């Protein structure tokens, strides 16, 4: 046997050993024996910024030099695009967006944002390509991904009480203005079925190791949410187009308090109180003053009905349920769903059931 053949054999044996060790390690560490291949999204890869640069140069009226860099890696990937002294961001959506949404359904969000910008609601809005389209396609190894260029949101996510008031007020303006948005395109709903029933189904699939007692708690928790949310009156603006993700970090404020809201991929038809509760769920959960001023800002434009106010806590819990369900489908986030995570979740379920 020559030295070259010997090296190849050693390499193959090493690779097999590493794979076996990896398999054993995965079996020991993965506590959730769910059929991930059937319930998770495709693994997301990071597209080279040079590909983004070429896309921008080929699809927009560019006369100055273009530079691109990765700005944020998350549910979607966000790239900073600089054209001369002008800044933009390009959002590259997950491949499963292309699989689960029609082009027209995806277009709903972008047309709506154009409408909001035209009506002076402070949002980051899409920039049309030279062919007048609002989005394009970039092919990645996991599939086709929607690419959308947006106006840049100056500022930071820092939030004081004055800014929380402005954010609440602007969310109410968004809701009121959206009642006049008309388009012949269907869009999904963040209703009781989506927030609760579908979320519970996903979590039950994910937790196929769970005890009957845990599953009973989950069912009782879901039923209580349905009962509370079903009490909300669908009248006078309480139901309509919602942003879907106003958790308190999807906005920037400049030093002189100029607001820009962004990241509306979860916009849907749903309860307006859900949008408000999403802020309570995140940014306002441990800051009563911030929450109260946000709510005051909202009600300075649109007064909430008693049934909406009474359902806020149920919507907070529904938001958490939906968030768990959504992220459990994404391979890159699976490591967060360990025993400690689920113990905490079920403790919260029990506390809510006792309230």
Image (tube, rainbow, N blue to C red):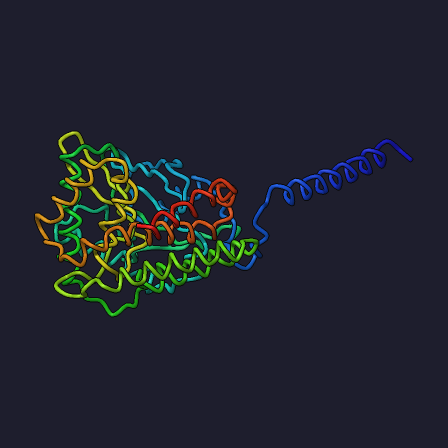
Where residue 195 sits: x, y (%)? 35, 58
Q: Residue furthest right?
A: 1
Where residue 89 sits: x, y (%)? 31, 42
Q: How many marks?
A: 0
Whether residue 108 sits left or right of residue 47 in the image: it is left
Q: Quadrant of the N terminus?
A: top right
Q: Residue furthest top?
A: 255
- Residue 54 makes an appearance in the image: no
In the image, residue 297 above or below residue 105:
above
When asked about the image quadrant of residue 28, the answer is: top right
Whether residue 194 sits left or right of residue 30 in the image: it is left
Q: Residue furthest bottom?
A: 184
- Which residue is at a point 34% across and 45% down the rendered structure image? 90
When asked about the image quadrant of residue 6, the answer is: top right
In the image, residue 22 above or below residue 138:
above
Residue in the foreground of this view, choosing between 266 and 135: 266
Whether residue 43 sits left or right of residue 295 in the image: it is right
Where residue 343 sits: x, y (%)? 47, 43
Residue in the foreground of this view, choosing between 304 and 7: 304
Where residue 13 sits: x, y (%)? 79, 39
Q: Residue furthest left?
A: 300
Whether residue 149 sits left or right of residue 178 in the image: it is right
């Amino acid at each position: 046997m020559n030295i070259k053949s010997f090296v190849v054999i050693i390499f193959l044996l090493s690779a097999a050993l590493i794979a076996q060790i990896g398999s054993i390690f995965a079996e020991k560490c993965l506590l959730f024996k769910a059929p991930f291949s059937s319930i998770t999204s495709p693994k997301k890869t990071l597209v080279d910024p040079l590909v983004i640069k070429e896309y921008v140069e080929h699809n927009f009226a560019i006369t100055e030099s273009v530079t691109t860099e990765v700005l944020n890696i998350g549910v979607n990937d966000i790239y900073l695009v600089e054209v001369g002294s002008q800044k933009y961001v390009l959002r590259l959506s997950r491949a499963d967006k292309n699989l689960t949404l029609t082009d027209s359904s995806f277009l709903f969000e972008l047309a709506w944002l154009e409408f909001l910008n035209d009506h002076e609601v402070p949002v980051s809005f899409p920039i049309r390509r030279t062919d007048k389209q609002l989005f394009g396609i970039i092919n990645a190894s996991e599939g086709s991904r929607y690419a959308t260029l947006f106006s840049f949101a100056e500022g930071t996510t820092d939030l004081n009480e004055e800014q929380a008031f402005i954010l609440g007020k602007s969310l109410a303006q968004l809701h009121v203005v959206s009642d006049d948005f008309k388009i012949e395109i269907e869009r999904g709903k963040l209703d009781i079925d989506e927030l609760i029933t579908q979320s519970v189904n996903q979590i039950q699939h994910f937790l196929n190791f769970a005890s009957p007692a845990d599953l009973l708690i989950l069912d009782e928790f879901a039923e209580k949410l349905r009962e509370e949310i079903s009490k909300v009156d669908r009248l006078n603006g309480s139901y309509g187009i919602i942003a879907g993700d106003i958790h308190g970090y999807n906005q920037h404020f400049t030093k002189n308090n100029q607001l820009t809201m962004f990241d509306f991929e979860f916009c849907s038809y749903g309860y307006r109180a859900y949008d408000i509760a999403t802020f309570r769920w995140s940014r306002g959960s441990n800051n009563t003053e911030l929450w109260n001023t946000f709510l005051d800002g909202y009600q300075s434009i649109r007064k909430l009905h008693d049934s909406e106010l009474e359902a806020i806590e149920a919507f907070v819990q529904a938001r958490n349920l939906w968030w768990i369900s959504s992220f459990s489908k994404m391979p890159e986030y699976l490591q967060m769903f360990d025993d400690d995570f689920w113990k905490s979740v079920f403790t919260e379920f029990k506390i809510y059931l006792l309230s």
